[in-house]
């Protein structure tokens, strides 16, 4: 019998200041699981001024809009430039 190493997935979602950042490290430590914080990842990219960070900063501060791909071909083509119709 082969058991996948990823047998459980837990997502902590909620609004601003609801305790996600407080609870996630506690869950990580108690259950010995990986903790990925997308907000921390994006803030790091903004600090490093990468292309992703520049785009994320524009979205966060309302200077740009991100449009979701409308077709599978668009999705396969990669990220859309900021300001795409």
Image (tube, rainbow, N blue to C red):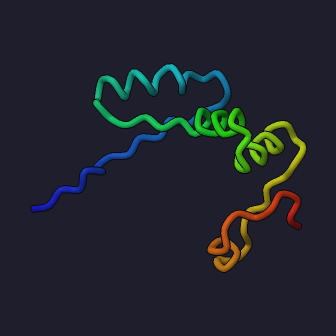
Q: Position of residue 18 (x, y in %)?
A: 60, 23
Q: Quadrant of residue 25?
A: top left
Relative horizontal placement of residue 40, taking residue 12 as reference (left or right): right
Residue found at x 71% / y 37%: 46
Relative horizontal placement of residue 38, taking residue 71 as reference (left or right): left
Is residue 28 positioned above or below 74 on the image?
above
Residue found at x 70% / y 49%: 52
Is residue 42 positioned above or below 1 on the image?
above
Query: In the rendered view of the protein, which quadrant contains the N terminus?
Result: bottom left
Q: Quadrant of residue 69?
A: bottom right
Is residue 55 positioned above or below 2 on the image?
above
Is residue 40 positioned above or below 6 on the image?
above
Residue found at x 90% / y 44%: 63
Count of numbered badges drawn on the protein: 0
Closest to the observer, 19 or 41: 41
Residue that protrudes farthest toward the bottom in the picture: 73
Q: Position of residue 47 (x, y in %)?
A: 70, 32
Query: In the rendered view of the protein, which quadrant contains the C terminus?
Result: bottom right
Q: Position of residue 19 (x, y in %)?
A: 55, 22
């Amino acid at each position: 019998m082969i058991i996948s190493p990823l047998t459980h997935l837990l997502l902590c979602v909620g609004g601003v200041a609801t305790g996600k950042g407080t609870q996630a490290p506690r869950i990580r430590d108690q259950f010995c699981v990986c903790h990925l914080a997308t907000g921390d990842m994006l803030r790091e990219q903004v600090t490093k001024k990468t292309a992703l960070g520049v785009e994320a900063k524009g979205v966060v501060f309302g200077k740009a809009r991100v449009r979701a791909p409308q077709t599978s071909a668009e999705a396969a083509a990669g990220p859309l430039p900021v300001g795409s119709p």
